[in-house]
Image (cartoon, helix red, strand yellow):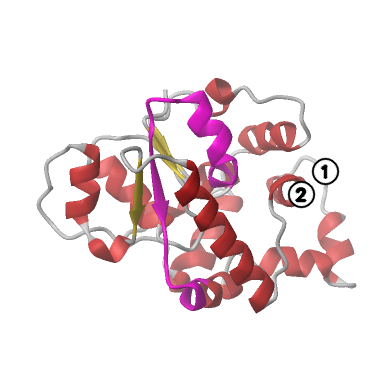
Amino acid sequence: MLQIIGAGLGRTGTGSLKVALERLGFDPCYHMYEVVGSVARMRQWIDVAEGRTRDWDAVFRGYRACVDFPAAAYWRELAAAHPAAKVILTERDPEAWYESARKTIFRLPLLLRHPLAGPALRALPSGTRAATFIRMLSVLNRDRRDIGFDRDSAIGYFERHNAEVRRSLPPERLLVYRVEQGWEPLCAFLGVPVPAGPFPRANDSARFWGNFRRTLWGGPAGPGTRG
């Protein structure tokens, strides 16, 4: 049963938040890397995006928390399905968010639109992790992300998403949070002691592609690479 729902978009510190939540005892925490590392989970999200299921218990079975895309795109449904869960909206300066996203999570959607790279990527052997990931990303984007990947469109989407989360949830249920704030506001919101040691830093832009490739091609999940 989910106790914490992360509503923040990717590249707002969601990898660091995953590690932090697990250190605080809310483990395991579901992140995009759990999806990238499993064809079965990718197929679950294809079914969600194409309307065949909204069985959230099956999607998140065994997890106490979730952060990052694709879970964050369905924050409203997840909040309704888990009324006792707390919601954390990770935010970041919009310009800094866009620059980080442009170097990382926007690359593959843009490649899929490229006249040469797009057809080659879509022609990858069916059933492989890479082919399933591309299909999942395509159907999730159609279902949930009304986003253009140029600067103005992307920042507009980012700001609309954050504003919608802020106005839709009562303040006692929602923490609006920046990871540079560290442990104190997060622990106060969750009602847990502040742990010893620095707040984790995981999956920054410099690590992103190594983490992603390793996970997609069969290595350990990405945000476990901590800094």
Q: Is residue 152 magenta?
A: no
Q: What range of the chain is rendered magenta?
A: 70-97
Query: At x 47% / y 77%, what residue is drawn?
Result: 96
Query: At x 47% / y 53%, what residue is drawn?
Result: 8
Please tell me which of labels 1 and 2 falls first in the chain: 1
Which quadrant of the view contains residue 172?
A: top left
211 to the left or right of 176? right
105 to the left or right of 116? left
Measuring from the top left, give residue 135's x and y in whole percent.
77, 47
Against 106, residue 1 (above or below) is above
- SS label for mark 1: loop
The residue that disc 2 covers is 131
- Give the label on residue 98, or none: none
Measuring from the top left, give residue 173's x and y in whole percent.
35, 38
Please state which of residues 68 and 174 is positioned toward the viewer in this rendering.
174
Measuring from the top left, give residue 153's x and y in whole percent.
68, 71
- SS label for mark 2: helix
Please state which of residues 209 and 185 is positioned toward the viewer in this rendering.
185
Quarter of the C terminus within the rendering: bottom left
Q: Residues within 10 Å of mark 1 (few under 14, many from 20)?
A: few
The residue that disc 1 covers is 126
Labelled pair 1, 2 in contact (Cβ < 8 Å): yes
Against 50, residue 96 (above or below) is below
26 to the left or right of 185? right
